[in-house]
């Protein structure tokens, strides 16, 4: 049985177990499922552990191997253009569905007040974190690390990516014998990290069960019923973007059969759904791109780490629905000008969003303030916090799917055939040796 099938089974069993203990109101069962959290946390830490060495090694090798610095600029331009374009499309889909469904008009004033009171404390913490978020100018300046080792220690990917690309570009101009010595070292690091990833992924089905069961067990059915229309609007928008926008993208630009594309990449979105973190999923995303889609390391090592930090299509779509939902609840009309502001602000805010759980809530504050809903920020965020974790899992899966779709398009634009490399490594659980 392939790894992504086992992960899917673990995910399904985890959701079913959580819903069952909620439906039967089994406090003991809920406590058992919540107690499994450390298993999921250990998995996330293990997979996050290899992100920094993987990003540095793969980016240095990939950039230095391009040979032509101008090619790097071409790949970078295509990547950023694709990411920003798909994010704008995602926001537009979210706005359109919110106008059609109007989820905020289906929440009673009594339910609104109960949710606001229940999550007021947590919402206040999110708003205070957003107040500390740097502006666009600071985000751009922070991309240049004053100390790349400090950035690595703090897990800051964007400045580390900048340094690794600059170092790799400089390395491509160094004398051949010296360049080869440095590249051999980083290639060894990259290979060792890939073996580590295969070891860690053996735990994935069990970790996915623990993560999803714990989240679903905490998920009260009363809250779910209250916010059902809002949550389904977000999920419908995410599904439309994932299977609509990305299908067109891979069909037209990558010249791949969308069904084959989604079948090949299934493992990465499943891990993303479970961890709610693009950064934690990055090792799996890169392995999937190279071994299941046939994308070259030169392209995947540049496009995917960048995508994990700036490509947040799912998050941007969710923010569009959330802003409209909050505006509808409080009777604030948002016209075409305000909706255009949402598209621009959500697209730009996604660049600075961290690839970690619930980062979208923090950037949501900025979008709310941009359309004059600052007075309702704390109350509005309190309304949606109850279902945020399950939506966070879903939108992260879409973010990672978008990274892979854009990487395939960039690779095809560089003349790559996207024929999967033969996978015979004994530790590659999704490869030939994994069939049972």
Image (tube, rainbow, N blue to C red):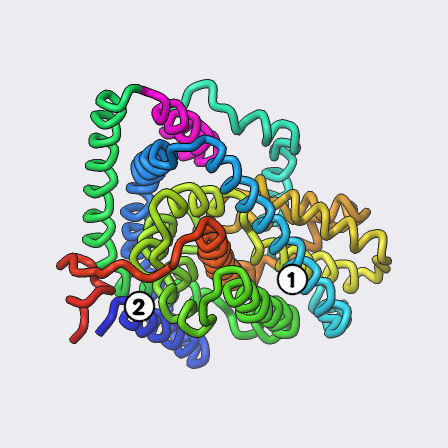
Q: Secondary structure at mark 1?
A: helix
Residue at point 78%, 49% (across, down): 341
Bounds of the magenta segment: 149-174
Membership of 229 in magenta stretch: no
Which residue is disc 1 drawn over? Answer: 115
Location of residue 2 (image quadrant): bottom left
* Main SS class of the magenta portion in the image: helix
Give me the C-alpha separation between circle 2 and circle 1: 37 Å
156 sits left or right of 235 in the view: left
Q: Position of residue 221 (x, y in %)?
A: 53, 74
Q: Residue at x 40, y 72 (%)?
A: 260
According to the image, label 2 marks what residue? Answer: 4
Looking at the rendered image, the quarter that the N terminus falls into is bottom left
Q: In which quadrant of the rendered view does residue 382 lie?
A: bottom right
Q: Earlier in the sequence, mark 2 or mark 1?
A: 2
Disc 1 packing (10 Å; few <14; some 14–19; many ≥20): many
| Residue 404 versus residue 140 in the image, above or below | below
181 sits left or right of 296 in the view:
left
Q: Position of residue 65 (x, y in %)?
A: 34, 35
Q: Quadrant of the C terminus?
A: bottom left
Would residue 150 be seen by someone viewing this image from the given angle? no
Q: Is residue 337 left or right of residue 316?
A: right
Kindly tell me whether residue 260 is visible in this rendering. yes
Q: Are marks 2 and 1 in contact (CB under 8 Å)?
A: no
């Amino acid at each position: 049985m392939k790894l992504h099938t086992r992960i899917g089974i673990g995910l399904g069993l985890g959701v079913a177990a959580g819903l069952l203990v909620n439906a039967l109101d089994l406090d003991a069962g809920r406590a058992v499922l919540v107690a499994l959290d450390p298993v999921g946390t250990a998995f996330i830490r293990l997979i996050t552990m290899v992100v920094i060495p993987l990003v540095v090694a793969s980016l240095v090798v990939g950039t230095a191997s391009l040979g032509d610095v101008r090619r790097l600029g071409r790949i970078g331009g295509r990547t950023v253009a694709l990411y920003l374009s798909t994010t704008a499309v995602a926001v537009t889909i979210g706005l359109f569905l919110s106008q059609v469904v109007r989820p905020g008009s289906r929440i009673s004033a009594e339910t609104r007040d109960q949710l606001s009171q229940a999550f007021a404390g947590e919402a206040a913490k999110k708003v205070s974190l957003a107040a500390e978020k740097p502006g666009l100018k600071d985000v751009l300046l922070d991309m240049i690390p004053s100390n790349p080792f400090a950035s690595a220690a703090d897990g800051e990917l964007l400045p580390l990516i900048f340094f690794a690309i600059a170092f790799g570009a400089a390395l491509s101009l160094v004398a051949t014998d010296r360049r080869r010595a440095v590249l051999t070292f980083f290639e060894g690091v990259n290979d060792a990290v890939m073996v580590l990833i295969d070891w860690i992924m053996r735990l994935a089905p069990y970790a996915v069960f623990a993560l999803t069961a714990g989240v679903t067990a905490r998920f009260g059915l009363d809250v779910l019923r209250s916010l059902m229309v809002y949550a389904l609007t977000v999920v419908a928008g995410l599904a439309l973007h994932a299977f609509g926008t990305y299908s067109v993208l891979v069909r037209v630009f990558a010249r791949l059969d969308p069904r084959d594309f989604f079948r090949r990449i299934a493992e990465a979105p499943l891990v993303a759904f479970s961890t709610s973190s693009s950064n934690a999923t990055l090792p799996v995303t890169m392995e999937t791109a190279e071994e299941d889609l046939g994308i070259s390391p030169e392209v995947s090592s540049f496009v995917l780490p960048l995508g994990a930090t700036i490509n947040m299509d799912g998050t941007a779509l969710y923010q569009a629905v959330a802003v409209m939902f909050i505006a509808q609840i409080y009777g604030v009309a948002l016209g075409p000008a305000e909706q255009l502001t949402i598209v621009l602000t959500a697209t730009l805010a996604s660049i600075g969003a961290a690839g970690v759980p619930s980062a979208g809530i923090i950037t949501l504050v900025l979008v709310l303030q941009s359309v004059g809903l600052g007075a309702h920020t704390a109350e509005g965020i309190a309304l949606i916090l109850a279902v945020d974790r399950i939506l966070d899992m879903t939108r992260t899966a879409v973010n990672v799917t978008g990274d892979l779709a854009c990487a395939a398009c960039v690779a095809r634009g560089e003349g790559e055939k996207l024929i999967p490399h033969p996978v015979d490594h004994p530790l590659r659980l999704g490869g030939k040796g994994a069939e049972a």
